[in-house]
Amino acid sequence: MEKNAEKVWTNCLKIIKDIVEWQHFKTWFEPIKPISIKNNILVIQVPSQFFFEYLEEHYVNLLAKTLKRELGKEARLEYRIMVDSGSKNKEPLMMDIPGQGYKMYPNNEMDFPLIINNPVKNPFVIPGLKKMQIDPQLNPVYLFDSFIEGDCNRVARRAGKTVAEKPGANSFNPLVLYGGVGLGKTHLAQAIGNEVKRTHPNRVVLYVSSEKFINQFMDHSRNNAINDFIHFYQLIDVLIVDDVQFFAKAEKSQDALFAIFNHLHQSGKQLVLTSDKPPKDLEGVQERLLSRFRWGLSADLQVPDYETRIEILERKMKHDGLEMPKEVVKYIAYNISNNVRELEGALISLLAQSSLNRREIDLDLAKKVLRNFVKSSSKEITIETIQKMVCDYFDVPYDKLLQKTRKREIVQARQITMYLAKAFTKNSLKTIGEHFGGRDHTTVIHSCQTVKDLMDTDGVFRENVLELQQKVQLAAM
């Protein structure tokens, strides 16, 4: 009996919804409409060419696996793309394209490291397993070139480069990368693996999440095949284990990891681990494992600063061939400050909505689209806020700003602060003057005029004022 396209797609969405982040699901899967199904080929309608390309690049494997569960191993996907007809009065044109990047996996469905050209359920027990057959499970997108270096991650990135250049033959073994969610631990860990594969093609690299490692161990334990499990991992030259904090209380899995760790380390192999906290703060992990985690280097990844966030966005835009007004880039960078993942998610959502609505990206659209991302604040910009910004910018002590002094750098900083306070607050000239050691309104008027005159004649001074204006504007958004 022919299955209903709507029902098949609904079942697929139930699976996808549990896997992808809510914002990504809302952006990339909710707009999709199932059209028809015939001969195990599901046709889905997407809003634009941009949508089609993004799905093929980022979610093709997920779509393949979920559709295979519904329609069987012969399942295929086709896209119906809405194309602008060039006239506002005409309906969008439709273009059907088969999923060119669509891949089908063997029956193991990625539960275990894949063995090339060998679709068996359990690769750990293959007699005479050859090391070069092991798929590294690396995402080719995660490279050092796409990992932006800043003060927040400089030590970690440079240590990663050292490890990639001389895996197992450096003092950073193991290399433990730790930090909060979305700060780039997985990116950097996989970048190490990809670089090793590029520069040392004969080295066997494997990336595995701790969750998958634990599940594999449990499966082999039930089948009395723990020795096969451990033997498999002892074949690896560079082992990357992601999110080791999830080993907490998994005692028997920790025993296996301990045996694997000892063998690899003693054999001069490289270990790279990631965690959401430093080894000393990992609770529920055996002390003997923690002591080995501390043998090498523990490097943290912190929240990127404003300038680094701008660079991340600009690099992402350049990579994807995108253009966006500078003010929008600054708006996103200022308001999305928690982690890199949210930063890229906000950019993607903005691009998707621009494509859906066929509207140019501007600040108004950014504010509308990103209201679910940005931090909300109802407080107005105050004179004190501007004073602090200017003091930080020029490295001037706050108390000096209020004192009577004729030092040029202090006088100019005070004048600029008054100028910005007049432009960005609702305070009277008298109130502004009172915030600067009790000066009167005529001093404020003189300061504002002086700033305007200097901006016309002094290029460096003008750049400083304009940059400070942008900072205040961003703070007011």
Image (cartoon, rainbow, N blue to C red):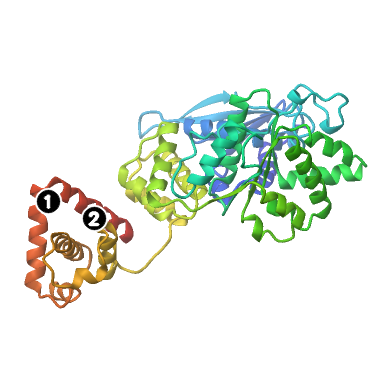
Where's the N terminus, which quadrant? top right
- Residue type beneath disc 2: Gln
Between 73 and 443, the one nearer to me in the picture:
443
- Residue type beneath disc 1: Met
Where's the C terminus, which quadrant? bottom left
In the rendered image, residue 372, in percent from the top left (x then y), is placed at 47, 56
Q: Residue furthest right?
A: 224
Q: Residues within 10 Å of mark 2 (few under 14, many from 20)?
A: some
Q: Residue furthest top?
A: 117
Between 349 and 158, the one nearer to me in the picture:
158
Judging by the rendered image, the residue that carries numbered circle 2 is 469
Q: Is residue 275 visible?
A: yes
Labelled disc at residue 191: none
Labelled disc at residue 455: 1
Q: Secondary structure at mark 1?
A: helix
Tell me which numbered mark, 2 or 1, is placed earlier along the sequence. 1
In the rendered view, tell whether residue 220 sits above or below residue 465: above
Quarter of the image holding residue 133? top right
In the rendered view, tell whether residue 476 sits above or below residue 2: below
In the rendered view, tell whether residue 136 sits above or below residue 465: above
Q: Residues within 10 Å of mark 1 (few under 14, many from 20)?
A: some
Count of number-bearing discs: 2
Quarter of the image holding residue 420? bottom left
Q: CA distance from mark 2 to mark 1?
A: 13 Å
Q: Secondary structure at mark 2?
A: helix
Horizontally, residue 228 falls left or right of residue 294, namely right
Instruction: From the image, state whether disc 2 or disc 1 is nearer to you.
Output: 1
Q: Is residue 91 visible?
A: no
In the rendered view, tell whether residue 161 sits above or below residue 199: below
In the rendered image, residue 85, in percent from the top left (x then y), is placed at 40, 28
Residue at position x 17%, y 59% in the image: 409
Residue at position x 68%, y 23% in the image: 202
